[in-house]
Image (cartoon, rainbow, N blue to C red):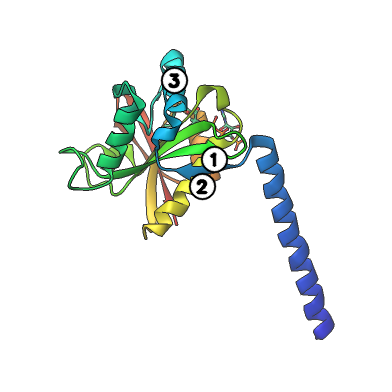
Amino acid sequence: MRVLLQRISAKRNLYDCKIRVNEKEIYKAMGEIRLIKPAIEYDDDIMMFRKEILETNGPDSFAGCYSLKLCETADKWVERCVAMENIETCPENFVTSTTYMAVRTSDNRVVGIIELRHHINHPILGTWGGHIGYSVRPSERGNGYAKEMLRLCLQRCKERSMDKVMVTCSTENAASEKTILANGGIFEKTVPGDGEVMKRYWITL
Ligand SMILES: CC(C)(COP(=O)(O)OP(=O)(O)OC[C@H]1O[C@@H](n2cnc3c(N)ncnc32)[C@H](O)[C@@H]1OP(=O)(O)O)[C@@H](O)C(=O)NCCC(=O)NCCS
């Protein structure tokens, strides 16, 4: 019996070790990121991020950071994100939300922005907008950052005691759909939204 238990334990250690190695390899390839709240120390990079998205101007640009399009200075955007967090300061007809910047540890570069809406009891969010929106900096796309940003954001959802979240994407947005699927999204249905057909996915936490 003891030998059997030792064997199981050895196998488990090997398995854990493999997972750690794989995580390390993933991070080595794309660079480790962390989610942090918008902060004025990043003002230059925030504005570079905004400029890149404006220049790319693709579909769904500024998803999860639409207010950055409207704010012409980083301090205005940081102020807006702070205001969005509390019901007392959140603009009327908006749902409170928390915005995070995905910052790469190795060089402190903002590679993405992700917004977590605190609930979706709202005509747009509850039909096709969903709980979470995100954008990756155009020059950093295709490196796995969206998948990792969503994974980290789901941890924040758990910390808020949310038990499931709706994440949506346009039927034309293959990259976003794969990001949702990679994080356990279960397809529910398509709905019209924003002049497109949107796919609704649910992720159980
Ligand atoms: C959608 C978006 C966030 C994806 O970001 P990203 O960092 O490039 O995504 P990732 O590198 O994590 O890749 C996620 C998956 O999409 C795939 N993918 C990436 N770019 C792709 C593309 N242009 N076409 C098809 N698949 C693509 C990746 O291969 C990966 O799939 P895999 O797990 O099978 O390998 C990014 O393109 C973006 O910011 N677009 C504009 C804003 C937006 O559309 N937000 C989502 C709104 S719903």
State which quarter of the image contains the C terminus: bottom left
Disc 2 residue type? Arg
Q: Residue at x 59, y 29 (%)?
A: 142
**Numbered mark located on residue 147 in the image:** 1
In depth, the one of 201 and 154 nearer the eye is 154
For the residue labelled by badge 1, is the local secondary structure a helix, a strand or a loop?
A: helix
Residue 194 location (% of width, % of height): 29, 26
Asked if the residue under mark 2 is in contact with the one under mark 1, i.e. CB atoms within 8 Å, the reply is yes
Q: Residue at x 46, y 21 (%)?
A: 48
Residue 183 location (% of width, % of height): 52, 46
Label 3 and label 1: CA atoms lie apart by 19 Å
For the residue labelled by badge 2, is the local secondary structure a helix, a strand or a loop?
A: helix
Residue 162 location (% of width, % of height): 36, 57
User: Relative to 30, is 103 on the left or the right?
Assistant: left
- Can you tell which of label 3 and label 1 is closer to the viewer? 3
Q: Which numbered disc, 2 or 3, marks the residue that appears first in the sequence?
A: 3
Q: Is residue 180 visible?
A: yes
- Can you tell which of label 2 and label 3 is closer to the viewer? 3
**Numbered mark located on residue 151 in the image:** 2
**Which quadrant would residue 72 be assigned to in this image?**
top left
Location of residue 71 with respect to 156 vertically, above or below: above
Q: Which numbered disc, 3 or 1, marks the residue that appears first in the sequence?
A: 3
Q: Residues within 10 Å of mark 1 (few under 14, many from 20)?
A: some
| Residue at image mark 3 | 53
Badge 3 residue CB within 8 Å of ligand 1:
yes
Which residue lies most toward the bottom here? Answer: 1
State which quarter of the image contains the N terminus: bottom right
